[in-house]
Image: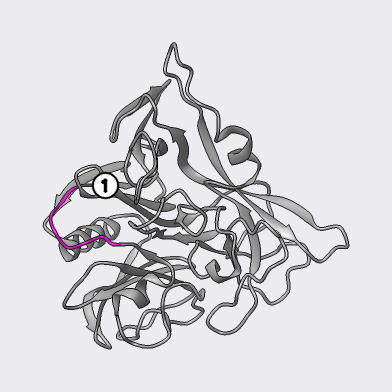
Amino acid sequence: MAETTGSATGLEDFFGNLLAYVGTLSGWTVDETITTVDSGRQCAVSKGNLYVQWRWDVSSPNTVAMYQSTGFASSTRAGTQAGDSGNGYNSNNDTDENDLKSDRCIDEMGNAAYPSYYFYTDSSATYVHVAVEITAGDFRHFGFGNLEKFGDWDTGSGGEYVYGHVGTTSTDATADGISFLLDGSLQDPAQAGDGATMRLSGLPDQGTEVYGCVWGDKDQDTSDGTDTAGNDRLKVIGGARGGPLAYGFGWAPPESSTGLSLFQPIACFYKNDVPAVPRVYLLGFQPDTRMVHLKYLAAKDTVTLGAQTWRVFPMVRRVDGLAAGDTGFIGVAYLTNP
């Protein structure tokens, strides 16, 4: 199973379709169908050491909080599950829009009919990546899975990630403070709760930390926050809009005579601050996903590279220029036939 597509009548219909899809994948379990827990709607899935939950408002569903944990108990509020990563609003049981938007979430999905959605996985169902068109030409991305690891830094419970889509329609959606995919462009300590999280183990000088926080951190010395149990989190840098690959290749425009565009891998690095001179280690890559410049490509176009077929999407809206909520030509490509 590779690319699966459809449409939805609204938010709960969409998540019902997502749960049905995940339930068909090898090794995945739907831990909780859509239900009301502590005045909010939520659902949950898992595979192996990766547990994922979503939560939204009952009466006015719009923004959806997204969580990662190391276990699951039914009828227990998302954000309070065993081994919660600390990202995703969990201060109390309310589902106020502004509260949900204050931490990792899928921002402003709305509840009208969705023209299209696209689900992606590989032959072993090691990940689920999602692009959903909430209105014509307006997209959200989120996902969860296992990192395509570089080397053998861990053979057990490490590399599991969860990412949402933290943005705003009131500012330039390419700015710092906005988080897409495994993203390295968050650069303020207050943003540590917005981005992707990843389970880590077996790394040099790793102590009791269970999770890494994926972000940019321009000063490289600020806090990565804690998980819900209070454990410090490790620093993971790089990602979709940060790190050496993004800075080395992400600015390269398409070739004007042919329209050819670079497909930039999304790499994540562990930054070890313990040595006197900090060290950076390549952890791996977000599987079957690339960043791409969309100047000569339209939303939902396909690109064939040898035996591979990729489908491209804007981060939010493909616009020649940047206004509120736009993402210019910043694009994402998903492999349709891994």
Q: Which residues are magenta?
A: 108-115
User: Which residue position is annotated with label 1?
Assistant: 138
Where 223 falls versus 276 (above or below)? below
Crowd tier of the residue under label 1, counting other residues whose Cα lies within 10 Å: few below 14, some 14–19, many 20 or above: many
Give the image location of residue 97, x and y in percent. Answer: 29, 74
Q: Position of residue 186 (x, y in %)?
A: 55, 58
Q: Which residue is more in the foreground, 1 or 6?
A: 6
Q: Is residue 139 visible?
A: yes
Asked whether 82 or 226 is in front, the reply is: 226
> Is residue 114 part of the magenta span, yes or no?
yes
> Camera-side residue: 311 or 47?
311
Q: Residue furthest top?
A: 257
Was residue 163 drawn as part of the magenta stretch in this picture?
Answer: no
Q: Can you give x and y, in whole percent of width and height, for residue 281 in the image? A: 72, 51
Amino acid type, callout 1: Asp
Q: Main secondary structure of the magenta part?
A: loop
| Residue 200 spot, x, y in % from top left | 62, 64
181 left or right of 245 in image: left
Q: Quadrant of the N terminus?
A: top left
Query: What residue appears at the point 33 percent right and 87 percent down from the top-left corner?
Result: 93
Q: Quadrant of residue 300?
A: top left
Say which quadrant the C terminus sits in.
Answer: top left
Single out the residue that lies furthest toward the right. 276
Residue 336 seen in render: no
Q: Secondary structure at mark 1?
A: strand
Q: Nearer the viewer, residue 30 or 299?
A: 299
Q: Is residue 226 above or below residue 300?
A: below
Snapshot quadrant of residue 71 = bottom left
